[in-house]
Image (cartoon, grey):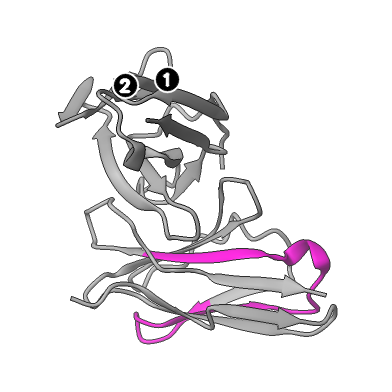
Amino acid sequence: GENVEQHPSTLSVQEGDSAVIKCTYSDSASNYFPWYKQELGKRPQLIIDIRSNVGEKKDQRIAVTLNKTAKHFSLHITETQPEDSAVYFCAASFSPLGYALNFGKGTSLLVTP
Amino acid sequence: GAGVSQSPSNKVTEKGKDVELRCDPISGHTALYWYRQSLGQGLEFLIYFQGNSAPDKSGLPSDRFSAERTGGSVSTLTIQRTQQEDSAVYLCASSLVGDNEQYFGPGTRLTVT
């Protein structure tokens, strides 16, 4: 599959601050962009996703933006809380049916009280 | 309802031995995926099954890796002649047809000594 680049690899913020994680992808056919949260020793869980016909999506403190022209998408977490601490993965679909995913290498987010 | 389950949860094997990893998807999910997650890394796509269609094997790293899905439900990932670099957590996920959200299992941690 094509590459998905994710930055930063680690991010430390104070409780209440915002956190932003950015990803770029190379496959122009990608049409589905999910974000997963993985706590230590646990399975990845979907927190938000966006499809190619939408530029922005918001769910409470979490938002995702997509720029298809530039092939990048970002995760924004506002009013961060210690329980937001985890590894976050972005992904982009790549199979012809748009189901299989290429994942970024992850961002380890630490929210300090 | 029951989520995706995987067995065994942990597997330690000697280099050169064959191993089989099992995945039980969510009932009614016709799409099934295998990923591999090495320590501190993102998820690497291995193979994708969709209904009765031919699987997308483009992510399998070598011909020592194979997978099958019987009856459109349970899947088995087989690694022959295991090598130390095969050590990783093997994650299975499933999704509904036409619904991209993938639900992950707890993973099988494979250690090759």
In the image, residue B107 lies at what x, y percent? 50, 69
In the image, residue A64 lies at what x, y percent? 28, 26
Residue drawn 59% across the image and 78% down it: B10
Q: What residue type is labelled 2?
A: Leu
Which is nearer the eye, A26 or A50? A50
Measured in 3D between alpha carbons, the distance from the residue under mark 1 to the one under mark 2, in whole angstroms, is: 6 Å
Residue indicated by mark 2: A66
In the rendered structure, which disc, 1 or 2, sits on the residue that comes first in sequence?
A: 2
Tell me if residue B88 is in the magenta stretch: yes
Residue A40 appears in the rendering: yes
Callout 1 secondary element:
strand
Q: Residue B32 carries which label?
A: none
Residue drawn 51% across the image and 34% down it: A107
- Compared with residue A16, is residue B106 higher up or lower down, i.e. above or below? below
- Horizontal side of A53 relative to A71 (left or right) equals left
Residue indicated by mark 1: A72
Callout 2 secondary element:
strand
Which is nearer the eye, A37 or A85? A85
Q: Mark 1 vs mark 2: tell me if same chain.
A: yes
Q: Are marks 1 and 2 in contact (CB under 8 Å)?
A: yes
Tell me if residue A66 is in the magenta stretch: no
Please state the extent of the stretch shown in magenta in the rendering: B68-93
Chain to which mark 2 belongs: A
Q: Which amino acid does label 1 sit on?
A: His
Q: In which quarter of the image is residue A84?
A: top left
Image quarter (top left, top right, bottom left or bottom right) of the N terminus of chain A: top right
